Amino acid sequence: MIELAILGCLKESTRHGYELKKHLREILGPLSRVSFGSLYPALGRLERSGAVRVVEAGGMSSPIPMTGSLTGEAAAFRRARLRGPRGPRNRKVYSITPAGEERLVALLADPSDDDRSFSLKLAFCRWSDPDARVALLERRRATLEQRLAETRRAIEARRARVDRYLHSLMEHDTDSTQRDIAWLDHLIATERSSHRNTRDATTGGPRP
Amino acid sequence: MIELAILGCLKESTRHGYELKKHLREILGPLSRVSFGSLYPALGRLERSGAVRVVEAGGMSSPIPMTGSLTGEAAAFRRARLRGPRGPRNRKVYSITPAGEERLVALLADPSDDDRSFSLKLAFCRWSDPDARVALLERRRATLEQRLAETRRAIEARRARVDRYLHSLMEHDTDSTQRDIAWLDHLIATERSSHRNTRDATTGGPRP
DNA sequence: GGTTACATGTAACTAGTTACATGATTAG
DNA sequence: CTAATCATGTAACTAGTTACATGTAACC
């Protein structure tokens, strides 16, 4: 899932690792929590698989191939402007590749649907098409509906020896899940109404 | 965290591995999801560390040391009664030990507080004392309050380029977290009012 | 000139998962 | 007799984490 976060973030703009972590934390708040120990290896993997590439590295390589027309001084000035107020120390700036964009769309479409992956997918789902978005929301809805049924079954199964805390937990979980579903329904309706072309082929939703 | 689930479950009654998994699924519903691949190794670890012990094993060892007075036939009959309608094939029935009960209380008291651990702890918190329960709830409350602040900060930080989906996700997260906090407040109040002896030494809660 | 923040990376560990291997017992 | 369920266990893999190691640049 960290690869989804990285690719979704690089799709907006080129960034280096450290910056990526800061930005992810800033935009995703508590639903990200990326550590360097997983970030850098992930960037390495993505680079080796061709999903991202380094466009600027620590003080040496040039982002755009130099045509040889710049003197040493001009090059230094240009580098100084490019790198902003802080300058590149030994950092590697990454950019997403076309292969990476494909991978991003594939990750957004994959059916795994725990709380964390769903949140991440929703956070970056603007990079996939409306149909894929509706599919994502519907899939999540189905997962929650199943969860709801299971929790209710668990509540029913033990009417007798009701533990105070466990019971309250499950009732609260039921409420939360119902609210989540209502929220998803709203998102789905909004999504559907904002693209009146592709009919609801996936699920055959409610007819008005 | 699987050890907490196992110990909490064995505290109620002796059980064998397979039964443990079924029971956990039944009572915890979607908030458990224990697989055999983690259950059996965990039972092994707990046994080696003396937190649980085998009280009855597959067809051979006797739960209570035989005094030698039983004939082969009588022993078989007794075994048949002990094992109920299905009989022990090659199964190992586990029981929690005093050391295991201490470990259970320690696990309930440990400060890690992600969604999953909190749910599990609440599910089994009846095995610890009222003070520990209030401490658990207060700790969770603090975690959620922090999450709330962080999410709000993230929403504020990006007023400008608001992504539809990410924004909705965060607003919904804010609502959910607020409701979770209100629920915790209710639990805390109930817990406090049900034991009027030990005053709120931990946090110095609101004075009436 | 020392502290803080920037920047990248590796190693060991954590807490699980799925898939595999094995076999007993029971219901139809 | 054969399929389903009960029952235990291992091996390989997953997706991260924390702690360590290293070094640069900015700030005061």
Image (spheres, coloured by chain):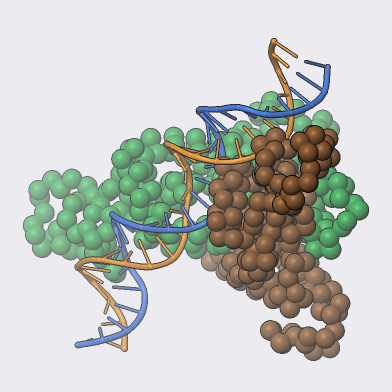
Chain colours: A green, B brown, C blue, D orange
**Where on the picture, by quarter, is residue B4?**
bottom right
Q: Nearer the viewer, residue A121 or A200?
A: A121
Task: Tell me the residue at 10%/63% (across/down).
Answer: A73
Task: Tell me the residue at 78%/46% (across/down).
Answer: B69
Residue B34 vertical placement versus D11 (above, below): below
Task: Tell me the residue at 81%/47% (across/down).
Answer: A154
Name the outermost residue toward the right. A160
Q: Nearer the viewer, residue A101 or B132?
A: B132
Residue A81 vertical placement versus B72 (above, below): below
Instruction: Provide residue B64's location: percent of width, then percent of height.
Output: 74, 52
Residue A67 vertical placement versus A78 (above, below): above
Judge from the rendering whether residue B137 lies leftward or rightward of residue B37; answer left or right: right
Judge from the rendering whether residue B18 lies leftward or rightward of residue B79; answer left or right: left
Instruction: Provide residue B98's location: percent of width, then percent of height.
Output: 68, 66
Instruction: Provide residue A135's location: percent of width, then percent of height.
Output: 64, 35
Q: Nearer the viewer, residue A84 or C2?
A: C2
Give the mark count: 0
**Residue B148 visible within the image:** no
Task: Tell me the residue at 69%/25% (across/down).
Answer: A201
**Where on the picture, by quarter, is residue B109?**
bottom right
**Residue A121 visible within the image:** yes
Q: Nearer the viewer, residue A109 or B188?
A: B188
Instruction: Provide residue B174's location: percent of width, then percent of height.
Output: 67, 63
- Please identify the quadrant where the C terminus of chain A is shown: top right
**Where on the picture, by quarter, is residue B118?**
bottom right
